[in-house]
Amino acid sequence: MTAPLSEFPPGFLFGASTASYQIEGATKEGGRGPSIWDTRAATEGLILGGDTGDVADDHYHRYVDDVAAMAEMGLNAYRFSMAWPRIQPNGTGDVNPEGFAFYHRLLDEMDKHGIEPLVTLYHWDLPQALEDAGGWPNRDTAYRFEAYARRTVEEFKDRVKRWTTLNEPWCSSFLGYAAGSHAPSRTEPALALAAAHHLNLAHGLAYHAIKEVAPDAEVSIVNNCHVPRPWNWANPGDVDACRQIDALANRIFVEPFVHGRYPEDLLEDTRDLTDWSFIQPGDLDLMKDTVDIFGINYYSSHIVRRNDSLDRRMGNDGHGSLGRGSAWPGADHVEFMPVMGPKTTMGWNMDWSAFHGHLLRMQRDTGKPLMVTENGASFDDVVERDGRIHDVQRVQYLHDHMQAVLLAIEDGVDVRGYMIWSLMDNFEWSYGFSKRFGLMRVDYDTLERTWKDSAYWYQETIRTRQVTPVEKAPTLGSTPPKAF
């Protein structure tokens, strides 16, 4: 790829991301209530290997060492989520003081090392009591989220300036309520569209609540970015399939906040499923102009085509997930095609050019600054005889994508930071512990963390503020590797 700027700009944030259910464990400690992912994990056959997040990485008890590792790596930011059921076990009513106390302890450690918190209020762990009351298809859940966000920001407003309301509402709505491949494991496509709207409403409500409590807070929403391309650019059907996926994946979670409307083509594509009567007067006005900075989660791109013989009910969700239904309500004849080139163990392609293009597009479409809130890759890491983990494929992936960020900045995109997914291997949702994304390897028998070559590579990249050459990675670090 063409060499972009040589250095990241002053003030750029270098960090890593995690999510509460994937790393914390202690699901029955500290007053935490059950979440929809506890329920899914306890249901036989829904998680690969029968794995659960009951212990996960035991971050709840090991956070001091984990923050020390971040500091040694050179991170100046850490994106993590606060667990709604740990703070408010039933999703309503009084907060749990032990939940607040845990996150205060975590923030204390981060303060010691000068690591800035980027806090996500919702990373998919809906309190089970709210799902029992209808979940995200129920409008009331948006108001419950508003109250939770308000109370949490009141507690931490003097310690946290950067807040994300929702992580990847596409997954929460379409994988959770249409495909059934994520919690709460439902396959009701019309309700998935209602869930999408209520998630957007929840963001708008929470934005205004946060600003009332902390006017100077920076509030974002984080979307997983799909970059669909037509199988055949000369085929109008394939081009239209690309448009459909773009509407369902991207524009549905951007246009309400930028323009105060849903895309007209989205409403037309889904008219056989719903009349969108769940949108109430004032909803779209409330959502408009409620994003200070857009979070970008990017992993791969897609190639799609029109296939009138396809029955999407059979389960191809186009997201590499373990699905029973279609994650694309209203796009029943869109087929996701095999993508050429190397892939991660998730089956996702490695396409830095699509990442670069999407950053340019988001700058153009929103006019807002951007934060890369997740970017990373899963590979089958091998522990060598000397204890080192030479994850050269991950280093190559990170190298190319960080170069793409620099190239985007050179092209005029206001990118404020880059968070690698993930700090350490963790519970990868319906794939259990079978997929490894971390900069640190976690031994799930002992819970020991070991730095991979990618961690040393990232440490050097942060130190120099330049993207370290891939070939330098094996020469960095100590022998034996750092372990925590």
Image (spheres, rainbow, N blue to C red):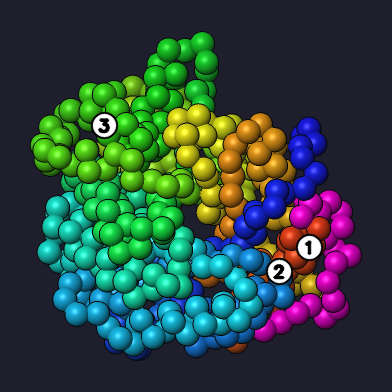
The quarter of the image holding the N terminus is top right
Q: Which mark is residue 420?
A: none
Q: Which callout, 1 or 3, points at the residue further toward the start of the chain?
A: 3
**Cα–Cα gap, marks 3 and 2:** 42 Å
Q: Secondary structure at mark 3?
A: loop
Residue linked to disc 1: 463
| 10 Å crowding of disc 3: few (<14), some (14-19), many (20+) | some
| Three-letter code, disc 2 | Gly
Q: Which callout, 1 or 2, points at the residue further toward the start of the chain?
A: 2
| Numbered label tally | 3
| Three-letter code, disc 3 | Arg
| 10 Å crowding of disc 1: few (<14), some (14-19), many (20+) | some
Q: Which callout, 3 or 2, points at the residue further toward the start of the chain?
A: 2
Q: Is residue 451 left or right of residue 417?
A: right
Residue linked to disc 3: 261
The residue range painted magenta reads: 465-484
| Three-letter code, disc 1 | Arg
- Asked if the residue under mark 2 is in contact with the one under mark 3, i.e. CB atoms within 8 Å, the reply is no
Q: Is residue 259 left or right of residue 12?
A: left
Q: Is residue 417 left or right of residue 39?
A: right
**Cα–Cα gap, marks 1 and 3:** 44 Å
Q: Residue at x 52, y 23 (%)?
A: 231
| Residue 83 appears in the picture as rendered | yes
Does 315 appear above or below 213? above
| Residue 35 appears in the picture as rendered | no
Residue linked to disc 2: 74
Q: Residue at x 56, y 37 (%)?
A: 359
Q: Residue at x 26, y 43 (%)?
A: 287
Does 174 appear above or below 482? above
- Asked if the residue under mark 2 is in contact with the one under mark 1, i.e. CB atoms within 8 Å, the reply is yes
The x and y percentages for residue 17 are 54, 63
**Cα–Cα gap, marks 1 and 2:** 7 Å
